[in-house]
Amino acid sequence: MAGKKNKTSEPNFFKDVYEVVKLIPKGRVTSYGAIANYLGTKMSSRMVGWAMHGCPKGVPAHRVVNRNGLLTGKHHFKPPYMMQRLLEKEGIQVSKDKIVGFADKYWNPSAELL
DNA sequence: AACGTGACACAGC
DNA sequence: AGCTGTGCCACGT
C-alpha cells in the first residue's frame, strides 16, 4: 500500500526545529521567535517551545531561550540548572537565568543561514 | 469534535 | 514598568 503515514500530520515542523537548533554554533544562542520566524511561523513561537518537549538527543535546547534572553525553559531540564551549566561551559555567561550579552551572542538563523 | 494547555511574542493599559 | 489579553499552532484528554 501507499506509504501513507498513520500520523495525522508529519512532525515536519518539529523536525525543522531540531535541525535548526542543532545548527546553532557553539557559544551562541537564539530565541524561539527567531526559529519560528525562520520556519515561517514567526508568530507561533509557542510551537517551537512545544517542539522542544520532544527534543531528541543531540538537540542543544539549552541554546534556545526566549526573546528576553531568559532561560524560561530551564525548569524543564533535568536537573534544571543543567541549562545554565551547559551555557557557561560553552562560554556563555548567565546571570539570574538570563543570558549576559544576549544581543551579542544572538544567532539569527534567518540571517546566518540565509 | 471541542476544550484546555504550553519552554512565546506583541499590543494595550 | 509590570500585568492582562490576544494570536498562533499543535498535542493531550
Image (cartoon, coloured by chain):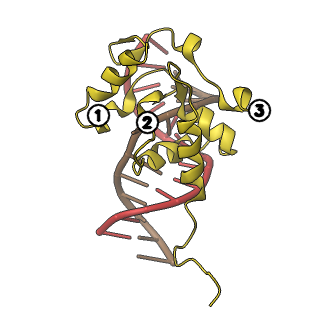
Chain colours: A yellow, B brown, C red
Tell me, yes or no, whether the two marked residues, 3 and 2, touch with CB atoms within 8 Å.
no
The answer to which image quadrant residue A93 occupies is top left
- Secondary structure, mark 2, is helix
**Disc nearest the viewer among 1 and 3:** 3
Residue that carries the numbered disc 2 in the rendered image: A61
Closer to us: B13 or A43: A43
Q: Residues within 10 Å of mark 1 (few under 14, many from 20)?
A: few
The percent position of residue A14, horizontal first and vertical second, equals 54, 52
Rendered-image quadrant of the N terminus of chain A: bottom right
Label 3 resides on the chain identified as: A
Q: Are marks 1 and 2 on the same chain?
A: yes
**Disc nearest the viewer among 1 and 2:** 2
Mark pair 3, 2: CA separation = 22 Å
Badge number at residue A75 = 1
Q: Residue at x 47, y 49 (%)?
A: A51
Task: Give amino acid for label 2.
Answer: Ala
Give whichever of discs 1 and 2 has the lower sequence position.
2
Q: Residue furthest right?
A: A114
The answer to which image quadrant residue C12 occupies is bottom left
Q: Residue at x 55, y 60 (%)?
A: A11
Residue that carries the numbered disc 3 in the rendered image: A114
Task: Give amino acid for label 1.
Answer: His
Task: Give amino acid for label 3.
Answer: Leu
- Secondary structure, mark 3, is loop
Mark pair 1, 3: CA separation = 32 Å
- Secondary structure, mark 1, is helix
Q: Residues within 10 Å of mark 2 (few under 14, many from 20)?
A: many
The percent position of residue C1, horizontal first and vertical second, equals 43, 11
Tell me, yes or no, whether the two marked residues, 1 and 3, touch with CB atoms within 8 Å.
no
Q: Residue at x 32, y 13 (%)?
A: A96
